[in-house]
Image (cartoon, rainbow, N blue to C red):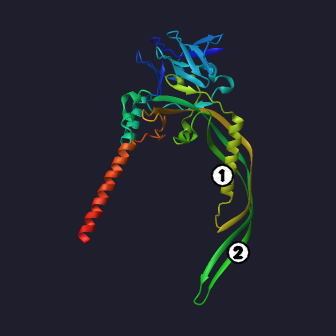
Amino acid sequence: MSASMTYKCPSCGGYLEFDPARQRFACPYCGRAYDEAELGQPQTTAQETPMQAPSGMRGYHCQMCGAEIVVGETTAATRCYYCHNPVVLTDRLSEEFRPDGVVPFCLQKKEAEQRFRKFVERKTFIDREFFSTAQLEDFSGVYYPYWYGDVEGAASFDGEGTRTSVVVGPRETVTTTRVFRVNREGRLTFRNMARKGLSSVDRQLSDGIHPYRMEELKEFSGAYLSGFLAERRDIDKADVQAEMEKEANGYAASLMRSGGSFNSLTGRTSFRADKARMRSVLLPAWVLTYKSGKDGSPYYYMMNGQTGAICGKLPINWKKLLLTAAGIGAGVFALLCAGGLLLW
């Protein structure tokens, strides 16, 4: 069954969007704002027979205008292409795909755009087309799925440690090395280990805008997605948990081998994870994709929707860069020539 949902204003019947500035649900028509507890039941449309859509896509109906909305396999929240009504696709986030929590947007689009402009304006050799107003129209707020995990286990180290002392006398230098048997045991817990939950997201780009303030994590509600785009995870918990346990093993080895009062430590470490708590969460990001008109290469830019941290590959104006380099080179050459004339 295909099902979509829209949160409507109790006062005027218009659609509600989550307002990052006020951290409330606002109506763009009458201006009223509500807390989550004040929201009524969302309007839901269910369709028994899926609409005809291209392979890998799925069709829904907009509750406001009745238009067809066609989305990809992992899309969980979007807007109607005709009336711009925000739509949450409830069947995409039900049962095993329902997130455990969500970190709401804290930056509004206008503030994110200002931060973006300030960031790129400091870059001298950025393609000027990247600053265009039309380009910023594609600046989108997206909730991306992540896995967060706490891994706990027993760790041990068995080996040898050395302590070396040097005494310098008037006639000789004495170096003393003492060797100790070292055995360490304990329990280690690694918290808030993060992994992306969507395979199509570039990990280097998504990791570049971490960390998030996870203490602000809210219990999941589809209302937080209203007015934004959202993606559903397609990476299994078991795969992510195995990665996290492997990473925890590396951290444990480093901690158990830390020198402390020893000059060196050699031996064997072990870590056996026996407890793991995994949480599926949605995290906010402002995203911009720029396709250069010169070579058609895509450039991706991402901003943390909570903290404003920035990561991305920006398009360089190579012609301007080469002309500047040539000018600097010519200037240096002229100075060298002038200096040579003076010396001669």
Residue beneath disc 2: 178
Q: Nearer the viewer, residue 53 or 79?
A: 53
Question: What residue appears at the point 43 percent right and 29 percent down from the top-left corner?
Answer: 109
Does residue 110 appear in this view?
Answer: yes
Q: Is residue 87 left or right of residue 21?
A: right
* Percent position of residue 140, x then y: 47, 28
Question: What residue appears at the point 61 percent right and 42 percent down from the top-left corner?
Answer: 192
**Residue 108, relative to residue 187: is it above or below?**
above
Q: Secondary structure at mark 1?
A: helix
**Residue 139, relative to residue 46: is it above or below?**
below
Q: Is residue 200 left or right of residue 292?
A: right
Q: Secondary structure at mark 2?
A: strand
Q: Which of the labelled discs sits on residue 310, or is there none?
A: none
Could you tell me which quadrant the C terminus lies in? bottom left
Question: What residue appears at the point 49 percent right and 31 percent down from the top-left corner?
Answer: 105
Q: CA distance from mark 1 to mark 2?
A: 28 Å
* Percent position of residue 99, x then y: 63, 29
Q: Which of the labelled discs sits on residue 251, or is there none?
A: 1
* Percent position of residue 108, x then y: 43, 30
Q: Quadrant of residue 279?
A: top right
**Residue 70, relative to residue 304: is it above or below?**
above
Amino acid type shown at disc 2: Arg
Amino acid type shown at disc 1: Tyr
